[in-house]
Image (spheres, helix red, strand yellow):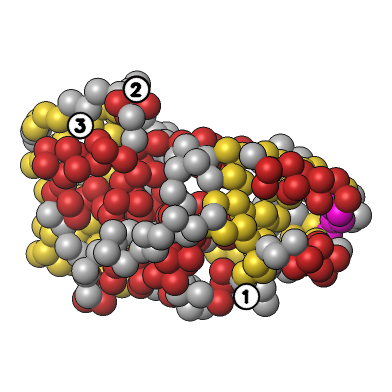
């Protein structure tokens, strides 16, 4: 573990990393517990002996999109993790209620050591890379876990999940499929507290980027990310073609990241200096950019996700507010239009820096 941490130190400054302390602890429930202290955050890696996971569906929004709820229990029904985010301070009532409802459901038992790295939105590229991949890498590199529970009753398993395992040298057999119900293992390994930070961002980058496979040339490419056919139609820039024409006149490349494999996206963004994009999961790829990049995000209001990711990774970020056309749609979704002349001026100013 200490060797792996040492290898990450050259990726970000000690002032941002903070001082990392690692200690082995054990108690009646957890055979292994590792604490990583990064600045003021504590990341806990735990191996729960003969624990079980309760998995259930959570429908969301008018389209009834399927999210997942999960709770991890000890044999004496102590809840130690809820939804992949809470540890020992979670409300007991909600998961216990679901647990009672699942008493007659099928239960999978395995005597293997299994890791849990997904959260309720794991099928989204941003959530997988920012929240789930660090947990996967921490469990694999620090605790030696090489098999992981994964929900499989999605319409289709996103290819970037399978490609993530491949990037780590894990085969398809590393995925242990589960559906809603209760599932137990001889040891359930999970991570708590790995919130997005400079540390988790660099863990993902270090764990998935093959230094031999990325572009090492000093390129300063500028790209515009268009939203391809694979992207949900819940967010649409009406004058995208006008923006694309303006970009092409300036020699800016137009890319649809959804048409690329994970390795192709890593290779591409390792040579990119400036990214222009509508708010969306494609901006997650700034993970693969060299520090000092420039991000121009088109959004309908303040969006902290990619600003935080950019700043954690040492990139410069700015946002241009677009005007919503369908004002009845809340949040950052809907149909909107961007002022092309203003965007053009911002791009020109950024490219002069």
Q: Quadrant of the N terminus?
A: top left
Q: Is residue 236 left or right of residue 270?
A: right
First reached walking from the N terminus: tag 3 or tag 1: 3
At a point 91% along the width and 54% down the height, the residue shown is 325
- Mark 3 or mark 2, whichever is nearer to me: 2
Front residue of 84/304: it is 304
Q: Where residue 129 sits in the image (x, y, percent)?
A: 43, 55
Q: As displayed, is residue 168 above or below residue 197? A: below
Q: Position of residue 258 (x, y in %)?
A: 57, 72
Query: Which numbered dot is residue 18?
Result: none
| Quarter location, residue 334 | bottom right
Determine whether 145 is above or below 90 in the image.
below
Q: Which residue is mark 1?
A: 230
Give the crowd class for mark 2: few <14, some 14-19, many >=20 residues within 10 Å: few
Residue placed most toward the observer, 39 or 190: 39
The residues tagged by marks 2 and 1 sit, at their Cα atoms, a distance apart of 40 Å
Residue at 20% in and 31% down: 35
Measuring from the top left, give residue 159's x and y in whole percent. Answer: 43, 74
- Assign the C terminus to one quadrant of the image: top right
Camera-near label (3 vs 1) is 1
> Camera-side residue: 282 or 225?
225
Q: Please rate how many residues cluster around mark 1, counting C-alpha atoms within 10 Å: few if below 14, some from 14 to 19, many from 20.
A: few
- State the image quarter where residue 113 is shown: bottom left
Q: Which residue is mark 3?
A: 35
Q: Say which of marks 2 and 1 sits in front.
A: 2
Specify the segment rendered in magenta: 335-340
């Amino acid at each position: 573990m200490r060797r792996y941490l040492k290898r990450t130190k050259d990726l970000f400054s000690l002032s941002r990393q903070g001082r990392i302390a690692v200690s082995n602890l054990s108690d009646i429930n957890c055979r292994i517990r590792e604490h990583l202290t990064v600045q003021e955050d504590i990341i806990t890696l735990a191996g729960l002996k003969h624990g079980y996971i309760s998995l259930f569906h959570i429908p969301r929004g008018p389209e009834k999109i399927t999210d997942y709820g999960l709770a991890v229990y000890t044999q004496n029904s102590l809840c130690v993790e809820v939804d992949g985010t809470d540890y020992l301070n979670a409300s007991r009532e909600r998961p216990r209620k679901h647990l009672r409802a699942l008493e007659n459901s099928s239960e999978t038992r395995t005597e293997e050591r299994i890791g849990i790295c997904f959260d309720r939105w794991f099928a989204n590229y941003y959530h997988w890379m920012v929240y789930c991949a660090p947990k996967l890498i921490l469990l694999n590199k620090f605790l030696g876990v090489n098999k992981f529970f994964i929900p499989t009753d999605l319409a289709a398993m996103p290819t970037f999940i399978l490609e993530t395992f491949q990037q780590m040298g894990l085969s398809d057999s590393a995925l242990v499929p589960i559906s809603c119900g209760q599932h137990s293992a001889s040891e359930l390994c999970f991570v708590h507290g790995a919130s997005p930070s400079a540390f988790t961002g660099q863990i993902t980058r270090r764990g998935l980027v093959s230094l031999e496979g990325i572009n090492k040339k000093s390129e300063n490419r500028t790209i515009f990310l268009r939203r391809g056919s694979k992207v949900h139609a819940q967010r649409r820039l009406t004058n995208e073609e006008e923006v694309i024409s303006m970009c092409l006149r300036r020699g800016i490349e137009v890319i649809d990241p959804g048409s690329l494999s994970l390795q192709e996206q890593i290779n591409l963004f390792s040579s990119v200096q400036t990214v222009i994009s509508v708010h969306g999961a494609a901006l997650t790829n700034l993970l693969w950019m060299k520090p000092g990049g420039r991000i121009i995000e088109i959004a309908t209001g303040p969006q902290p996700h990619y600003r935080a990711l950019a700043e954690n990774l040492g990139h410069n970020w700015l946002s241009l507010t677009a005007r919503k056309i369908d004002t009845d749609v809340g949040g950052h979704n809907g149909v909107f239009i961007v002022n092309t002349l203003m965007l053009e001026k911002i791009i020109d100013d950024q490219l002069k820096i």
